[in-house]
Image (cartoon, rainbow, N blue to C red):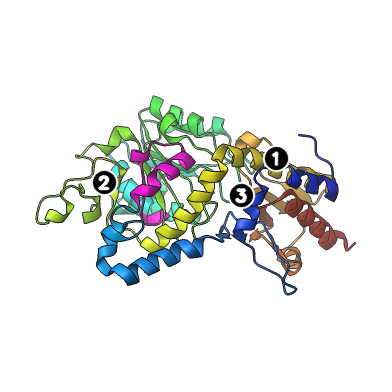
Amino acid sequence: MKYINTKAFAEEQDQNDPLSHFRSQFHFPVKADGSPKIYLCGNSLGLQPTQTSGYVQQELNDWAKFGVEGHTDAKTPWLTSHEDLAQPMAKIVGAKPEEVVIMNTLTVNLHLMMVSFYKPTQKKFKILIESDAFPSDKYAVESQLKFHNINPEDGLILWKPSEGEHLCRHEDFEELLETHKDEIALVMVGSTNYYSGQAFDLKRIAKRCQDENITVGFDLAHGAGNIQPNLHDIGADFAVWCTYKYLNSGPGSIGGCFVHEKHIQNQSINRFVGWWGHNKDSRFNMRVGFDPTPTADGWQLSNPPILSLAGTRSSLDLFEKAGFENLRRKSVKLTGFLEFLIDELNNTDISILTPRSPEERGCQLSIQMKNADRSLFDQLTAQGVVADWREPDVIRIAPAPLYNSFTDVYEFVQLLKLCLYGN
């Protein structure tokens, strides 16, 4: 796509955008004068859909009206409420509905998956992750190693960028795998790195792991609703994600989990269990041995938080209407426009850490501001930009295609120019 560095071009793109009407279906934070802020922080917390309050209120109304009978009589019966979301969520991550369950939160799900899929032996006990994984992932992995009485210094293999670089090379991953294939019990990487914005080639990673008979799982915290991981087709063993970033379900909302169909009916697999994972046909018989549901639901522990599910349902309904492929096409154009405008600044103190190829990134660009500190970011914030600062010198900008516009991107770069040059 050929871009032009003018506001008129941005406005023309918005006028021709078939998804532009979704913007009005979200609440934007406002400045003191009542005008909307430029919100480019969906990689941390997605905006609230205007319809979400109605979805939540419906559950409150049903609770008031039915009490416990809301489990069967609510508009969306609570007993099966999470099941209704399996199909739309499966489209988001490229899975079969029976491979997806909405439950818990991301790191809880990661621990539950490692209980099932991290099976260390005396010889094969190591876990490979990317070196700059989100801290919670690293903490979780290290604690699992310690749980098995393995020193993380011995059991953790880090996939690092080459010296002087910011991005991980797949050739380095494959070299690590070849060197340590007889020692690695699990590969667990983020689909899209939270800091750099690099989206890894999950198919390539999964194929190499399968060739060596190594279990592989992915953290889609920055991938779900952003890129299409095609989890079933690539043969990932498991994956976990949150729903409050690109999936706009609300702060701290419920997470999601994928278990490939090749595992879901294996009743002998190790897992931590709870009553909501019991086969629903006999769940309420009580006092019987655990019989896991023969789907990803079999990894559930407890009945789901209904109010949190309401926020998730609200956003997934919008994703269904927009179509994920349509959103991805717009995302490529929107982030490409941002990249073009930053390049147009021609400022040697600004560099983009995120890969240039649309196939290697989602909507986020991580902008490194050399010789700058947080004061530049604070100036942008004062001008009404909502973005994200990461130490020591990176501003993360994520134009979400469901509610951001080309004009948002253009105006952000104009404000960045104002903060840099003062005119």
The mark that comes first in sequence, 1 or 3, is 1
Label at residue 402: 3
Dominant secondary structure (helix, strand or loop) of the stretch shown in magenta: helix
Q: Residue at x 49, y 37 (%)?
A: 229
Residue 368: percent from the left, percent from the top? Answer: 71, 52
Give the label, 2 or 3, closer to the camera. 3
Residue 203: percent from the left, percent from the top? Answer: 49, 30
Residue to which mark 2 is pinned: 298
The amino acid pointed to by label 2 is: Gly
> Left of 29 or right of it: where is 271?
left
The mark that comes first in sequence, 2 or 3, is 2
* Local crowd size for mark 2, using a 10 Å CA cut-off: few (<14), some (14–19), many (≥20): many
Q: Residue furthest bottom?
A: 32
* Local crowd size for mark 1, using a 10 Å CA cut-off: few (<14), some (14–19), many (≥20): some
Q: In terms of image quadrants, where is residue 41?
A: bottom right
What whole-number distance in Å separates the C-alpha atoms at marks 2 and 3?
Answer: 32 Å
Mark 2 touches mark 1? (CB < 8 Å): no
